[in-house]
Amino acid sequence: MFQIESRAQMSCLPRLKPKRFYDLVVQVAIIRPGPIVGNVMHPYLRRRQKREPVTYPHPALKPALERTLGVPLFQEQLLRIAMIAAGFSGGEAEELRRAMGYKRSEKRMKEIEKKLRRGMEQRGIPGKAQEEIVSSITSFALYGFPESHAASFALLAYASAYLKCHYLAAYTAAMLNNQPMGFYSPATLVKDAQRHGLKVRSTDVTRSDWPCTLEKEDDAWAVRLGMCYVKGMREASAQALVAERTRRPFHSIDDLVQRVPALTQAEVLKLAELGALNSLGNPLAAHSASGKTAFHRRAALWQAQRAARPAGPLLESLDEPPSNSPLAPMTPEERLVADFSNAGLTVGRHPMAWHRAEMQALRVWTAADLSQAPHGARVRIAGCVICRQRPGTAKGFVFLSLEDETGIANAIVTPDLFERERVTLIQEPFLLVEGKLQNQDHAISVKAERIFPLTGTRPEIPSHDFH
């Protein structure tokens, strides 16, 4: 979801608890290097939760800071503070704004800091208040939002939340059709949507278009994955397939291959491996009520390999080509690996769901159950790593997001532990983390003490790393 999907934003949201639009404006602005380095985020949250009183560096600054509980969050507030506390003229305030702007000149900020201190001394503002005001303004030189900018972003965040809540199918299809974007891969977006009740259907040559589309099922909408998610599939091939299907339905894999010459052999095999040809069934099973039976993937691969090759003299002499596949169906894990290898996601069970019994034997908590564990408890979490972050303001700490079939759990890795386990943390796609649970106002994370790779047959899951 736009602007509020990062780990830091999601950790802050349960504490800030937005109730009106302006709260979102603050939420967007507060998770920035400027407010964090200026040490204003935690004071604002404590005041928001009524755990500490609202105070001001100087009583004269109340009009500029009252709306944000005495804490300067926006560039406009800093300019007003400079004009009120240090007597800056409009031109000097504009000079300050430019110094805090794109180039963020340290030299100019130093010069402006001297002017600020002189002006505050002339107005009798004491040393402690001066330090607080100067710290706020110089921190913004790192990165601070104008209020108008934050309001524009908050509007997009609100619109995203509204659409996801009320039009989940359309929202998900649109997100999938506009990748890459945001923190999360299509694999995670699909699982998140499924946990919210959306049905997502796999790619199917009898139904899929190039983009992801909506299908009505009973009284609800489902998302049909498009052929754009078949790795190696060209849009021109998919469009040719759709155009031919519109003329009349395909009745077999041979029929598809013959009528869509734009499809390469590699594309036909990719479709088969993904299960996108399964619904074409077996054209030679005339004894069945429908005249065909559904393929499993390896049977479709067998037929696709045969259909994509020119017929030799022996096959040309047969009334009907051989159809029975000697290949055993894929196991669930093999289908999972094929899904991620060929599409980068699965609409079936999450990879961790297949190992839940093993995880339970190791006393691993699911992401959804972590809220039931007491603060400070030693717990184990496990999942595929979907995000690794090491913000410049975090003093070397690394933040991991581990996804299982129930949701996302967050782990905090200290600099020392990161250095010891660097290879495992960076290279392993699935991890088990053991540590102490931290539950701060329903913002839940695990402070890692030990980290282990999860071995076994597991697909390569895409992750958002160190961006």
Image (spheres, grey):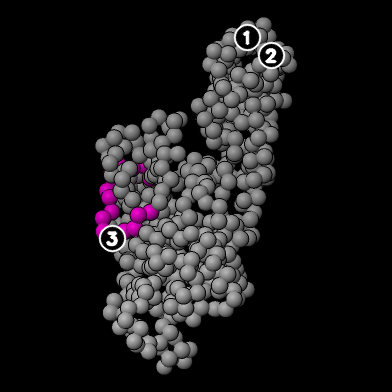
Q: Look at label 3 and name its amino acid.
A: Thr
What percent of the width, then of the height, locates residue 253? 44, 77
Residue depicted at x 32% and y 56%: 364
Percent x, y of residue 8: 49, 40
Is residue 280 visible in the rendered structure shown here?
no
Mark 1: secondary structure: helix
Tag of residue 457: 3
Q: Is residue 458 magenta?
A: yes
Question: Disc 3 versus disc 2: distance between alpha carbons?
Answer: 64 Å
229 is higher (above) or lower (below) than 284: above
* Mark nearer the N terminus (1 vs 2): 2
47 up-or-down from 408: above or below: above
- Which labelled disc corresponds to residue 92? 2
Q: Residue at x 62, y 27 (%)?
A: 72
Q: Quadrant of residue 177?
A: bottom right
- Where does label 1 land, which residue? 115
Q: CA distance from mark 1 to mark 2?
A: 9 Å
Q: Count residues near mark 3 (Cα–Cα under 10 Å), then give few for <14, some for 14-19, many for 20+.
A: few
Quarter of the rendering containing residue 348 = bottom left
The three-letter amino acid code for the residue at tag 1 is Lys
Badge 1 crowding class, 10 Å Cα cut-off, few under 14, some 14 to 19, many 20 or more, is: some
Closer to the camera, 209 or 395?
209
> CB atoms at circles 1 and 2 under 8 Å apart?
yes
Q: Nearer the viewer, mark 3 or mark 2?
A: 3
Label 2 SS? helix
What stretch of residues is rendered in magenta?
Answer: 445-461
